[in-house]
Image: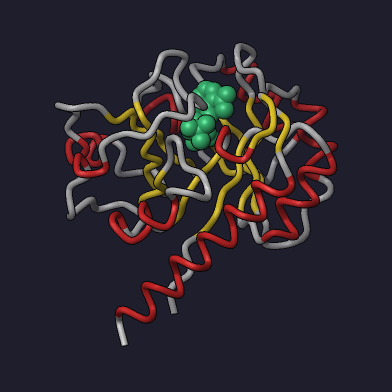
Amino acid sequence: MSRTRIKICGLTREADVDVAVEAGADAIGFVFYAKSPRAVTPARAAELARRLPPFVTPVGLFVNATEAELQAALQALPQMLLQFHGDESRADCERAARPYLRAARMEPGFDLLDFASRFSSAQGLLLDAHVEGYGGGGKVFDWSLIPRNVPSPVALSGGLHAGNVIEGILRVRPWAVDVSSGVEEAKGLKSATLMRQFCEAVREADARLDEAST
Ligand SMILES: O=C(O)c1ccccc1N[C@@H]1O[C@H](COP(=O)(O)O)[C@@H](O)[C@H]1O
């Protein structure tokens, strides 16, 4: 049975966390990047993460964070999965000795297979569109740029919403999907309706994959 994992990223309010969990999110992202409109402090992220039930993973998103910033966030939220979304090297990603996702900023000419081999210690690769400001831009990239034989689990991201995620899943067959601006009513403020619609669309895509395989 297909079960595409769902990550909803950039949550800043308790009510949004509760709806995301109830709608079926497997992971909730907290943005530790001060320039993002969705940025939260480590203390605030820890407060929000206290609402998560077992088996829903908190994910900390970093963009070129300093060692002190990374450690402060890890101290507040020791159980989180790390997501590196900037220009971090493999050594940067490994320095905390924690499981991590590495974001690849997809654009024509980008060699994803080379990137995957450079970041083979990542738990998975998160494929996002190349945008100014590193991410969260709501931009879809050309999914045909993704080779078939990516050796790591792939989280498809970049401009996803309830209206295009079914097509994304059917075409790319990712391990997970990740969404931020596509489920927002305003930057950093998630919409309960859009989050529910997004999760329902993912389940619909899974049902279609199962139907196609019988
Ligand atoms: O959310 C942000 O503000 C952000 C800032 C810097 C880097 C990444 C960011 N978010 C991540 O970007 C992708 C795509 O987001 P969207 O759905 O296109 O808005 C997603 O993985 C977020 O986790």
Relative to 79, say whether 190 is above or below. above
User: Is 130 situated above or below 60?
Assistant: above
- The x and y percentages for residue 204 are 49, 68
Above or below 41: residue 74: below
Q: Foreground: 172 or 68?
A: 172
Q: Which residue is drawn at 43% across and 21% down?
A: 86
Residue 174 quadrant: bottom left
Chosen colour scheme: secondary structure
Q: Is residue 96 visible?
A: no
Q: Which residue lies furthest to the front in this view?
A: 163
- Please state, as top left, top right, bottom left or bottom right, where the N terminus lies in the image: bottom left
| Lateral position of residue 47 relative to residue 85, left or right | right
Find residue 139 and report its horizontal and vertical position in percent. 41, 29
43 or 135: nearer the viewer: 135
| In this picture, residue 107 sits left or right of residue 62 | left
Residue 28: name its quadrant.
top right
Which residue shows up at 33% across the image and 28% down it?
105
Location of the C terminus (image quadrant): bottom left
Q: Can residue 113 be seen in this view?
A: yes
Q: Pick whichever, 59 or 35, lies toward us.
A: 35
**Could you say which quadrant of the image residue 142 lies in?**
top left
Taking the spot 82% from the left edge, 27% from the top edge, the residue there is: 43
State the residue at coordinates (18%, 41%): 113
Q: In this view, does 134 lie to the left or right of 16?
A: left
Q: Give x and y (percent) for residue 146.
A: 22, 44
Horizontal side of residue 201 vs 184, given as left or right? left
